[in-house]
Image (cartoon, rainbow, N blue to C red):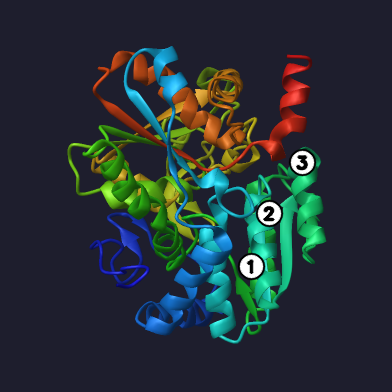
Amino acid sequence: MAYIDINTTNVPDERGYFGEFGGRFVPETLVPALNELVTAYEDAMKDDAFQQELAYLQRTYTGRPTPVTYAKRLSEKLGGAQIYLKREDLAHTGAHKINNALGQALLAKRMGKQRVIAETGAGQHGVASATAAALLGLDCHVYMGSVDIARQQPNVFRMKLLGAEVIPVESGSKTLKDAINEAIRDWVTNVRDTFYLLGSALGPHPYPRMVRDFQSVIGVEARQQIQEMTGRLPDVCVACVGGGSNAIGLFHAFRDDQSVDLIGVEAGGHGIASGQHAARFADLNISRPGVLHGTKSYVMQDENGQIMHTHSISAGLDYASVGPEHAYLRANERAFYTFATDEETLAAFQTLSQTEGIIPALESAHAVAEVIKRAPQMRRDQIILVNLSGRGDKDLDTVIQALGNI
């Protein structure tokens, strides 16, 4: 059995479109590199040796399968649905990002690209990229906004310790959007010998598809695990959504199960009315279809089409657009999207820590915040499966600043 089955859905089409979203909007310089990447990826997915090597590393290095944990005390506290956590926080490097980074790094090596570049917000994709590069002997350069560098110092040190060069980005809002801008500029300049190891389910075709496929292991495992534990599928799957890689990784295995609601949780920041958030689907006055970083999706933009500044307490959700497959799922009413504010997220961060002894990433705490709202409204015989996309040690400085002495 192949580790990844690429023939699992009819989207995207051969041009990389998920309905009206997706595609490829890039300088002509990058078209040959993207065509080369499409060919290399499709060849790799058909190659048993590549799939076996990836499966072996995911099992013996990443630590897959990650478990599903029944959150018994949280379920009892909320008094409604039974809550289960898919524990991506237990994967090597502490988050789901390693699934995709390892797959793409293997592909880079297969293509003969010795130099890899990556972008990062929360730092987890940067750490995962640096980790995979160290494992495979690749040269790694990570672009990171200076605002994110300041709030994610532990991950910055980890990347450097792993041998990566961390390049501060001082332009724009100095966050994830700007890090992606600089990574793309680097790629355009060094396209012949450089592989862009993009971290989320966005960017030009084939990245949204490729990242989804590498992250689909989350949902494949969770679907089997929850059935073994409970005898049936969950009623609801919940995941946080920035670019959307952890969510699409979970959702993909359940997309044909109409009995399972798929809920993505965006960053509500200081509230929708404040304008200081990253909830692309919550305020369609400022978020509408547009092109950012090579793909068409919903983009937060002003009346002149200029990209708006975003805010989230979590660096990984602080992004003005969203992966095109999420826009497609929303348009087809297969997935639904809500948001959690910074305040709700911090409360969820504490609640999960104190009821289950699990300190979540602030990104993941957005999903937990939605569970805290939703579970009490459900019956006790219903099941929520939430993707705990990462662990929270990277966020302790941010939480200390926000909460002081708890």
Q: Earlier in the sequence, mark 2 or mark 3?
A: 3
The amino acid on which the numbered mark 3 sits, given as a three-letter code, is: Val
Report which residue position mark 3 lands on.
147
Q: Which of the 4 image quadrants contains residue 362?
A: top right
In the image, residue 337 sits, relative to residue 228, either above or below, namely above
In the rendering, at what x and y percent does residue 403 appear?
73, 17
Identify which residue, 181 or 380, lies in the foreground: 380
Q: Dot 2 surroundings within 10 Å: few (below 14), some, or many (20 or more)?
A: many
Mark 1 Cα shell of 10 Å, populated few (<14), some (14-19), many (≥20): many
* Residue depicted at 28% across the width and 44% down the height: 228
> In this image, 173 relative to 42: left or right?
right
Image quarter (top left, top right, bottom left or bottom right) of the C terminus? top right
Say which amino acid is labelled 1.
Ala
Q: Which residue is mark 1?
A: 132
**Residue 60 or residue 246, whichever sits in front:** 60
Number of residues whose C-alpha sits closer than 10 Å to that of mark 3, classed few (under 14), some (14–19) or many (20 or more): some
Asked whether the viewer can see residue 219, the reply is: yes
Seen at 81% across and 52% down, the residue is 157
| Labelled pair 2, 1 in contact (Cβ < 8 Å) | no
Residue 139 location, quadrant: bottom right
Q: Earlier in the sequence, mark 2 or mark 1?
A: 1
**Label number found at residue 173:** none
| Mark sitting earlier along the chain (3/1) | 1
Relative to 380, residue 248 above or below: below
Q: Residue at 63% x, 37% y: name it.
A: 309
Amino acid at circle 2: Ala
